[in-house]
Image (spheres, rainbow, N blue to C red):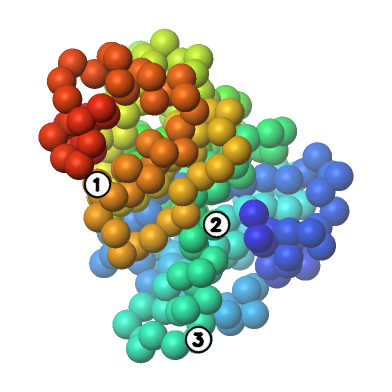
Amino acid sequence: PRRVWDLRSHRVIPWESANLSTPNLWAISHSWVKGSERHMVKTAVNSYEWPVPVPIGVTLEAVRNELLRHGAEYCWLDVLCLRQKEGHRPKGAMEHMRAIEWEIDVPTIGNVYFGDLKVLRYYNGLGKAFEISGWESKFHWTNRAWTLQECKRGSITGGIFDENAEQRSLADIEDGPPAHFLRKGDAPLDVSRTACGLFGVLREMQLREAEHDIDKVTGIGFLMAGAAVTLPVYSENIDTEAAWTRCVRHMTPSMRDELLFRFPEPGDRNHLWFPSWTQI
């Protein structure tokens, strides 16, 4: 990561400036709410470098307080630590810088959630209260493309501020479909080890929702990298098939073998030996 949120000083600092020997490093995994339900906030936390998209009625101070209650000192949060778009403002130097940073930062988001750090998960939107309804919404955490790479065992459910209320809420859904989704979100996805295999993970991604189709390809890229040492850069200006071809080129040989030998029909685009993204 390029930046991290220092919760004690309440500001974003360069990653290398943080005391990351501390065990109190966290990350937030959250779903994005509808565009009509969020607004752009200019804040001193990121030195006003870009407007921060947050759900209406939610404040960064409230999110910070919840993290501090859990004992966090540093936190990676995408809207604060990943440069965001300037909205409808004309393209300028800052927007050009964002595009350059995203080439590297977006494909490697999944790396944030690996390792020993703790994860606070908001199912209904950043900073929003946990609800036992809305599990079928395309904006719910369990249905978003980006969150597939953010599954981590032991993640803490955010938006529950009363310990007794937390126990009651989780007990209410213990045996229902939401409980299945909760357990699924606790299983880290390792394509080389998961029972569903490469095509199962690809199928899961295809069933999820994303603002842009290319987000699905980029989101799956980190999971499919396996032991590979390279990832394709992120580009907003190429179509999904071109992005998928880049992804295949960066896979490990064993994964490319799976595409070649296990997919039941030839590719229907520029390459016959592996399926196109629309065929998955």
Residue at point 13% right, 34% down? 268
Circle 1 residue: 241
Instruction: Describe the element under mark 1 as helix, strand or loop.
Output: helix
Q: Position of residue 106 (x, y in %)?
A: 49, 54
Circle 3 residue: 93
Q: Residues within 10 Å of mark 2 (few under 14, many from 20)?
A: many
Q: Residues within 10 Å of mark 1 (few under 14, many from 20)?
A: some
Residue at point 18% right, 16% down? 264
Residue at point 54% right, 66% down? 101
Residue at point 17% right, 25% down? 266
Circle 2 residue: 105
Look at the numbered discs 2 and 3 and tell me whether their residues touch, using CB distance below 8 Å.
no
Instruction: Describe the element under mark 3 as helix, strand or loop.
Output: helix
Look at the numbered discs 3 and 1 and tell me whether their residues touch, using CB distance below 8 Å.
no
Comparing labels 3 and 1, the label whose residue is closer to the camera: 1
Task: Check disc 3 and give the amino acid type.
Answer: Ala
Let me know if residue 149 appears in the view: no
Q: Position of residue 227 (x, y in %)?
A: 58, 28
Q: Mark 3 and mark 1: span between their CA atoms? A: 30 Å
Task: Check disc 1 and give the amino acid type.
Answer: Glu
Q: Looking at the image, which is closer to me, 266 or 118?
A: 266
Q: Position of residue 226 (x, y in %)?
A: 53, 28
Q: Mark 1 and mark 2: span between their CA atoms? A: 21 Å
Q: Is residue 228 left or right of residue 256?
A: right
Let me know if residue 256 appears in the view: yes
Q: Quadrant of residue 270?
A: top left
Which image quadrant: the N terminus?
Answer: bottom right
Give the mark nearer the N terminus: 3 vs 1: 3
Which image quadrant: the C terminus?
Answer: top left
Q: Can you say whether 206 is above or below 84 in the image?
A: above
Q: Looking at the image, which is closer to me, 172 or 82?
A: 82
